[in-house]
Image: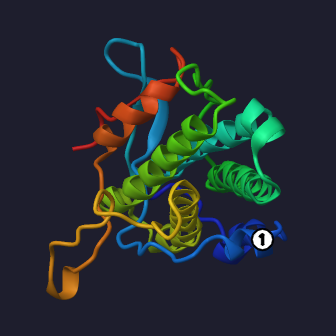
Amino acid sequence: MSNIIKPDDNTLSKPLYAPIKRRSFFIYAGATAGVTALALAGCSDDSDDNSSFIDVGANDVGVLNYAYALEQLEAAFYAQVIAGGYYLNTASAAEKQVFQDLALHEKIHVDFFRQAISAANATPLKNLTPDFSAINFGERTSVLNAAKAFEDLGVAAYNGAGQYIQDASYLTIAGKIVSVEARHAALIRDLITFNSFVGDDVVDFSTTGASARQEKSKSPSQVLETANMYLADGSKLSANSLR
């Protein structure tokens, strides 16, 4: 995609270093799940053949737009968490601080990708409308299980779609973000069951040698199958352009 204006890496990275109360977050983070191949498949505003989905595109702007879409979903989820009954009525002070930090992290990620896409002289994906009707935001188990699903999905999505990125500088930037997402995943697992920050559902413990203990990955179609469960009609995504 030769007509893309590549943004300056240092300029784009600045929002990632904004002060966001990281101290309390990392106290509870435990350990970091390893991250290997990074980057996501791109999205475009074009609908697929049945005109009911926003089709996933290719190339670097598509990579950024797909990441932007998933970050939108996570940010919307955590915004609703901190407005819900579990957070307001029963969450401990430590849990409240964790969710404040996660909500702020995801908002920063959304803002970052929007700016990165604009800096590439492209149009960001439209604002997506979530559908969280299946989640009980008044109940701790429901919230934590949903958070675990979102965080695991995000990391697996980055791991599984690195083949679609073209510009190595975007891979570097994605690595800075996905390392935080992996910490999110570890933290949520630790809140569910203490000292259980990783499991064989996300890390392949059967391998040996250089590839040992790598995180599992998911293809864009697998990722979107899950993500679409939490997106309203008109905001659902497809991966028809990725092969």
Residue named by callout 1: 24
Residue at x 52% of width, y 25% of height = 231
User: In the figure, 6 relative to 81: above or below?
Assistant: below
Name which residue type carries label 1: Ser
User: In the figure, 18 relative to 53: above or below?
Assistant: below
Q: Quadrant of residue 20?
A: bottom right
> Of all residues shown, which one is farthest toward the bottom?
209
Left or right, 212 with reference to 138: left
Q: Which of these two is toward me, 235 or 206?
A: 206
For mark 1, does the 10 Å Cα neighbourhood hold few (<14), some (14 to 19), or many (20 or more) residues?
A: few
Indicate the colouring scheme: rainbow
Q: Which of these two is toward me, 100 or 6?
A: 100
User: In the figure, 243 relative to 205: above or below?
Assistant: above
Residue at x 54% of width, y 63% of height = 190
- Look at the image and tell me in which quarter the N terminus lies: bottom left
Left or right, 18 with reference to 163: right
Q: Position of residue 76 (x, y in %)?
A: 68, 36
SS at mark 1?
helix
Q: Position of residue 97 (x, y in %)?
A: 80, 58
Q: Position of residue 36 (x, y in %)?
A: 36, 73
Left or right, 5 with reference to 158: right
Q: Quadrant of residue 123?
A: top right
Q: Position of residue 188 (x, y in %)?
A: 56, 57
Q: How many labels does the image show?
A: 1
Left or right, 56 with reference to 65: left
- Look at the image and tell me in which quarter the C terminus lies: top left
Residue at x 58% of width, y 25% of height = 132
Residue 41 seen in the figure: yes
Residue 123 seen in the figure: no
